[in-house]
Image (cartoon, helix red, strand yellow):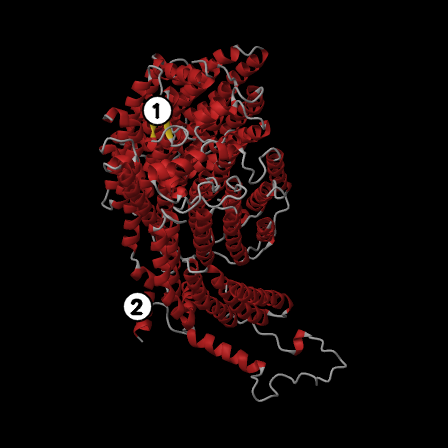
Amino acid sequence: MMTIVFSLFLLTMLVLVAVAILRTDNLFTAVMLSGIFSLLMAANFFVLDAADVALTEAVIGAGISTVLFLGALALTAEKDRSPPVGSWVPLISASALGAVIIYGVLQAPRLGDPNAVVHNHVAPWYLEKTPELIDVPNVVTAVLASFRGYDTLGEVFVVFIACMGVMALLGRVRPRRDSIKLTEYEERSRNLRHHLIPRIVGKMLVPFIVLFGLYVQFHGDFGPGGGFQAGGLIAAGVILYSLLEGDWRGRELVPEWFSSLLVALGALLYAGVGVACMLKGGHFLNYSVLFEDPIKGQHVGILLVELGVGMTVTGVMITVFHAFARRGVR
Amino acid sequence: MELLGLYNYFVFAVLLMVGLYCILARTNIIKSLIGLSIFQGAVFLLYISMDKIDGGTGPIILEGAPADTIYANPLPQVLILTAIVVGISTTALGLAVAVRIREAYGTIEEDKIQEMDREQ
Amino acid sequence: MTLHDQLPALLVAVPLFTAPIAYLLRAHGLPWAAAVAATVTAFIIACSLAATVYGGETIIYEMGGWPAPYGIVLHIDALSALIAMLVTGSSAAALIFGAKSLADEVGEEIAPSFFAAWILCTAGLTGMVITGDAFNIFVFMEISSLSTYILVSAGPDRRALVATYRYIIMGTIGATFYLIGVGFLYMATGSLNTVDIAARVGDVTEVRLLLVAAGFITVGMALKAAVFPLHSWMPNAYTFAPNVVTVFIAAASAKVSLYVLMRIDYAIFYKNIPNHELQLALLLIPMGILALFAGSMLAIYEKNLKRLLAYSSVAQVGYIALGIAMASVSGLTAAIVHMFNHGLIKGGMFMAVACLALRYRTVNIANLAGAGRAMPWTMAAFVIGGLGLIGVPLTPGFISKWYLVLGAMEKGWLGAVLVAAILLSSLLAVIYVWKVVEVAYFKEPRANATPVEGEAPLVMLIPTWIVVLAGLWIAIDSSLPVTMATLGAETLLGAR
Amino acid sequence: MDLALDIISAVLLAAGTFFVFAGGVGVMRMPDFYTRMHAASLTDTGGAALIIAGLLLQGGLTLAPVKLLAIFLFLFLTSPTASYALVNAALLSGLKPKARNETGLSLPEGDAVKPAPKLGERGTNKPDEDIRKAAAKTVAKRTPAKKPAAKKPAAKKKAAKKS
């Protein structure tokens, strides 16, 4: 009974925050509200028994994406001066979309009813076969890395592409006269250094955040965790350090060449494990052929693949943040 | 859970409408990108509300667990882990383009940009 | 497992493996070389896959060794092999053709990330074509779209950024619609493998879920393929992208979304939703006919040569949509053949435009006066391509229009309307091709125009003429695309 | 034994919830930013600490209490720092705290309380003027008034690091 009250509350809050984001004119408030939106989404996922996804949404949705939005806001105009355009096109298309979905959803299975089609076809096989074939407690990591490992390979390259894009767009640091003035940006970043207390506490916390990230990375088989969450956490630690100390100190901590090397090596590691399985005679990404004992092969395969994902996501998040931070200072 | 019924899916529909309206109605580029992330966030809710089972726990099979515990469906969670990272990648790319547009045009309001393009 | 059995996985694994390497190679020209190596290898693999599939059977490759509905399975039949060949071929040809033009437009600084994005765009498109898993199509669609955004944003003009921004918004909305469609499909059938969904869709009681899923997937894919009313992002994206990028995305990227539309609509929904082909026809035929006329009219009044060809692409996509809407073996064959032929024709024409842009520094039709004499070979290639658009015999355009008319004949009075629309829009095509020919051959170059240093470099002319000659060969002996298209159409409609 | 534990944790949880509830009401009722921050930051840290202490007792001898302790430490460090940083940033950006008479707090007439003395009359309270001057001084001290920005920013920062 309690979970019903809980989810009702969280879902209604979600809609309220979304409407608040739509109505607010100040961009800064909209970004902060979108951070709260992601956090509420993470809480929702936890109530719906999806711990892995809640952790990912909290780290990447609330953490990294808010920092990226703030970085972009620092480089562009603060205020959203334009009043919302009152044309009927968006209204019509949005309500048509909503009507179609509500029409379709009325026949959807009720939330949580056990004999829905979804729970009786592919899912029981995964829950039954994971202890037997892969022997890993966290079924989500097993499905993510092994049963549907090809999906996650594609996923690593989506993150790799985001890094390519940001490097291609913001990589070349050419002085632009009408970008944000140097003194104004200098003034803002110096202010952060003035905060003595946050700097001390931040410096104390950064090692523990990175340590927790590494724990999540290698603990992914046994509890909620894995490459994506670990990458986000470690990057959050480094970003916190660069936020407090100023981004040129951050770049001394994790230099540019190192983070882009991390990106490339992570992707190569994942694809390399796949090719190694082919060389040993199995299908692409079939870890059972890596060693004589297939279960050992699966364990090592999943560990390496999650490490590749963690490296790539960490590298990408750090490179993207530094690309935004460095863009302001010429 | 019976009471909750389809409430999750109605919230999904409302979030999609809010996201799409925010993208199309607002002319500020960064506001449209926030709308886009709400639009994508709504789809996560659709998938994850499919994986809930009454009395089920997270799909982590510990050694000591009794044999008949019900576990939530792991498949939508795997799909959504992928979709979240797709969302953040699109946002990062969109923000990079927004910064470049601000430098090239001096503004991130779509209507002003269209006027500048028309003059050219 | 011999190398031959591993080919389906290698088709995607090789480009995926070379992309980070291309990013790490910082030296001059090395990323381009890595990109050419990756795309040419992928093209060779695609051709050998097409050879094995030519007989009509389909290759099944289980990723990670897991059986069908539980793991991800690659599913290659004649149709997917044909499109994979088109994608990898046009990517390799554009890269080999465009070394000089890219160096001139995109510059050295971002070469590593640009060419890594190019390789991953090819890998994403081929990954979409050969996979048999509905969610996997979404993942590789994201890879190819994100890398296409990067390629388009590398254009020299500042308006490329605005075009990229609009493309990001429309592309992500399209991809999210597809994701919602797959979500409803998964809710109704409980599985993600396309073959398994097709098997289980028959006994689904909640038909509404299927209708909404079909609606979302069709609209999402139409948005990604720039079918007429949803095409607003495409002309600017094609115009302001670097010229060589336009060659590649014009020839390949729109076709893959139409392929996904066909595969999901016909493999899954065709037999299982009551009168599905009527709904598809009601949606696609008006959109197709509108695309034919609006695309051609817009092309006639266009002053920029690249945007003219982009609008003509909108019209040609309309032909393909008409073919898909006919829901008969000959109709689908015509659609698939036109996908292949249009890729060939448009690739050749955009190559010619890239040569013109390299020499004339502009793509505005008025300033290209006298190009016929200054650059005879390039303009000749352009004119042959233009004839292909019109559908003159001895060009690939004629073959696809022939099959379209054949397909339309079976439809009785509706067919007559379609035939009239096809012939009428071919006449419109004559007008906008003639407009360019007239300026190029019969107008004197303006007095103050800077003299052009003569013909395009040989390294760019040879690939252009190879593509044009390939078009002529297809026009004469069209067995390759037609047999594979008929095989594909029969498997889609379940006639095999 | 565990009955006693249950009672204690129930009491702790109730106290924690009351604190957080009081914080919420405080944020609603308080007139301006600084007082709201005051209400929110104190009660949240205190409330969260009490709730976690209550849960600790329920955990028994498994790993859960250790994790709860780690969360408690993390919250104990970050939440006051975050509030401090927020208020400091607000002060630097020049948000002026509202003086008492402007808040229009209507004190009950019949009450024996003598009218609130004007700010600054009592020796200890700094008048508005002083606060404004102090804020201006700190802002001025940090912004380099006339120093040319020509010097490479990284070099300037390195100089700042050495001093």
Which numbered circle lies on residue A142? none
Q: Is residue C359 left or right of residue B58?
A: left
Q: Quadrant of the C terminus of chain A?
A: bottom left
The quadrant holding residue C252 is top left
Image: B27 above or below A193: above
Q: Between marks 1 and 2, how big is the CA–CA gap?
A: 61 Å
Residue C156 x, y percent position in the rendering: 38, 43
Provide residue A318's location: percent of width, then percent of height: 35, 54
Residue that numbered label 2 is attached to: D155
User: For the residues tagged 1 and 2, is the chain the same?
Assistant: no
Callout 1 touching callout 2 (CB < 8 Å)? no
B91, A35: nearer the viewer: A35
Residue type at tag 2: Ala
Q: Tell me, yes or no, if residue C111 can be seen here.
A: no
From the top left corner, tell me how far across and down residue A133 is, in percent.
Answer: 34, 36
- Locate residue A80 relative to residue A68 in the image: left or right: right
Identity of the residue furthest to the bottom in this view: D123
Chain under callout 2: D
Q: Residue drawn 49% across and 32% down?
A: A120
Q: Looking at the image, is mark 1 or mark 2 nearer the viewer? A: 1
Assign a secondary structure to mark 2: helix
Q: Secondary structure at mark 1?
A: strand
Q: Residues within 10 Å of mark 2 (few under 14, many from 20)?
A: few
Q: Which residue is mark 1?
A: C60
Q: Name which residue type carries label 1.
A: Ile
The image quadrant of residue C467 is: top left
- Give above or below for D11 relative to C385: below
